[in-house]
Amino acid sequence: MGRRRQAREIALQALYIIDTSGTAEEEAFAIVNRREEPGDEATLGFARELLRGATLHRPELDRLIEGAAQNWALGRMAAVDRNVLRLSAFELLHRLETPVNVVIDEAIEIVRKYSTEDSTRFINGILDTLKEHRK
């Protein structure tokens, strides 16, 4: 697994912990890194940047995701799917150096690993809609 994918997975796991248990961002990041094989500083730095961005921009991201998810409230989405969307939406909208197709492909591969095959179509559809908000 590449370092960027590893960073995205670390950030996703921390977002999931924050979302499902209300744990603070730094504590969630520490929990994930106690369980996982320690990454190098660049990988951990990218993971931390993704986590911080998704956390700071969460209200905006949630609003955009719900708008794109027509008739799907965030609370009705599987927790993994919801957090993959938050993470990917942050990267799509705020990390413009990452190509759109890379963000979407990474999200699909991650959701395939942590969720269901049905979720891949759901995530792809929402991110495809959200890419229109990229500046």
Image (cartoon, rainbow, N blue to C red):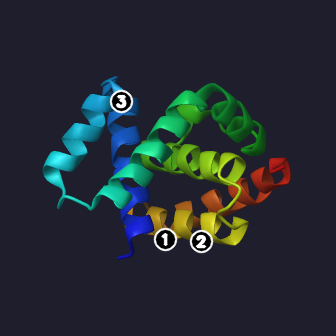
Which amino acid, mark 1? Glu
Placement of 34 over or under 19, stated as above or below = below
Residue 24 in sight here: yes
* Total marks placed: 3
- Quadrant housing the N terminus: bottom left
Which circle marks residue 109 in the picture? 1
Q: Residue at x 77, y 37 (%)?
A: 67
Which amino acid, mark 2? Asp
Residue bearing mark 2: 105
Tag in front: 3 or 2: 3
Residue bearing mark 3: 25
Front one among 108 and 71: 108
Q: Residue at x 31, y 27 (%)?
A: 21
Residue 101, given in percent of the width and then of the height, sits at 69, 71
Front one among 29 and 71: 29
Graded by Cα atoms within 10 Å as few (under 14), some (14 to 19) or many (20 or more), the crowding at tag 2 reads some
Residue 32, given in percent of the width and then of the height, sits at 24, 46
Q: Are marks 2 and 1 in contact (CB under 8 Å)?
A: yes
Front one among 14 and 116: 14
Residue 132, given in percent of the width and then of the height, sits at 85, 53
Residue 41: which quarter of the image? bottom left
Q: CA distance from mark 3 to mark 2?
A: 26 Å
Q: Residue at x 44, y 53 (%)?
A: 46
Q: Are marks 3 and 2 in contact (CB under 8 Å)?
A: no
